[in-house]
Image (spheres, rainbow, N blue to C red):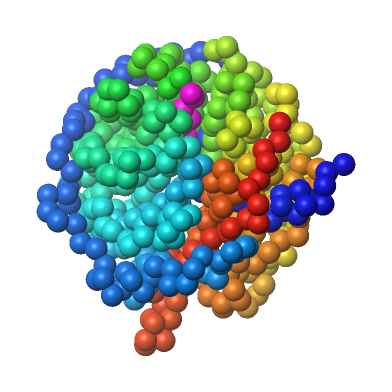
Amino acid sequence: MTSIPKLMRAACILLAAAIPLACGSPSADPAPDAPGPMADAPAPGHDAAIPVLPDAAADALVDAAPLDPLGWSPPRAIDDGQGEASLEPRLAVSASGDAMVVWRQRPHVWVRRYTVAGGWEAPEAIARDVATTELAIASNERGDFIVAWNHQQPSQGLSIQRFTREHHWEPVVEAMFHRSAADGIRIAINADGAAAVVWSAYFSGASAPVIHGRAFHPASGWSGPERIGDFTEAKISDVAVDPAGSAVVVWEQGSVTSMALYARRRSADGAWQRAVLLDDSGEVSQPRVVFDRTGAAVAVWVRSETIDGKRVRTRVVSSRLVADTWSSVTELEQADGVPALDPRLLVDTAGRAALVWTTERALAISRLIDGLWEAPHRLAVDSRESLSYYPPHAAASAEGGVAALWRQYDGARWSVWTAVFLSDLGWQPATELSGGVAARMLFPQIGFDAAGHAVALWQQYVAPAPPSVRTPAIVATHFRPSQPPQEQP
């Protein structure tokens, strides 16, 4: 029997950032691995000193009081909240205890770093005057971070920058495009620092967006841009990197009326295998991929069915890549008539995979145990709007649990809530983190480190003078556990 202190300790660790039949049959190679018209170029916005917030403003935002000894801290703004709108934050938390958030605050790209020992450092702009519309960030166990953003001026393209565990920024890597900025940016990093970035963009001579990527190896640096998909409509993609540095990419490809799901593997030496068709049912979306602790790649996605122009059924399905062969598609258990959307595929520091998704006004979780998905566990959410409007975020904890973070609406105000799922106890009671503030809240995200510390944040509308001005700010809270967790086998 599990001890009461252990259960209390596990229940307190509300811990995640983030982001994917006939299977196994290879399709024709969608494209050669030629970079085409793209090339490295000087990064826009990096040729002069980068501005930071005034000292007085930055000092006011850094935690003024000692970190809370236990539990969640009061939520507070971590940007200035008084100037241009702070939009679409993206959070990454490393197992080592560092966290970083990136957001866009016109016309710059801003980041702010958090450490367990020191709290929030002053924010800094890592790019200026770039007119970005999309951001992405990822971290690994040892504290490396990679940030990527698209830009539309002074030219269209994608910028990528690494922040190393030695706490310094490396030079920006830039890819320039002819017809559009990058879209659907995804990043993955393994524990040794090997990484991959994938995105979709129009290129010279292409009539539809194409999936491309770049890989990073600590010994050799960044590869040139590589075309992964062919010249047909390619949209959402995802990427994972295994401990050896191999990468797997999954993506949607097809036409406006019919999308298929493809996967392709890149070995650590840079060689691409042929693309594999995973699902040609015609309506696939939201692909996700990770590597589990056995070394197998696990992919999940949403499969939909439409009759007479009306969507009648959505299901979350999965396939695993074992020994270079993709398994048959598995459909996760789901009640008839209840839509399954917004899959969040997680992996903890021990490599255990879990999947969280939404079913209108409930959360569902299923874990991958011995290669099989268990029956889902559901948590009802008391909200008058669908959870899929701004999908929940989730993270796996060091004790084998999974924490979810979501926003809900009671008809008068929005609020942000979290709950943890424990292997032996199921879903625990939800806790509100937003402090009862009647404000609209978007983009909830959560992340944890190996010791059980967590950071949660969201975009929140505030009311500076005059009150009619509603400028979005980035609001964050952090969690300090009573005792370090003890990892379960």
> From the viewer's perspective, is 304 left or right of 113?
right
Q: Residue at x 67, y 38 (%)?
A: 487
Secondary structure that dominates the magenta span:
strand
Residue 203 can be seen, yes or no: yes
The residue at the point 52 percent across, 56 percent down is 455
Q: Relative to the observer, which residue lies in front, 379 or 37?
A: 379
221 in magenta: no
Image coordinates of residue 88 in percent, x first then y, are 42, 58
Q: Residue furthest bottom?
A: 466
Quadrant position of the N terminus in the picture: top right
Of the 4 image quadrants, the one containing the C terminus is top right
Q: Give the residues drawn in magenta, as a range.
A: 238-243
Image-based side of 364 in relation to 270, left or right: right
Taking 115 as reference, is 83 left or right?
Answer: left
Occupied quadrant, residue 340: top right
The spot of residue 387 in percent (x, y) is 63, 57
Q: Would you identify the image quadrant in which residue 352 lies?
A: top right
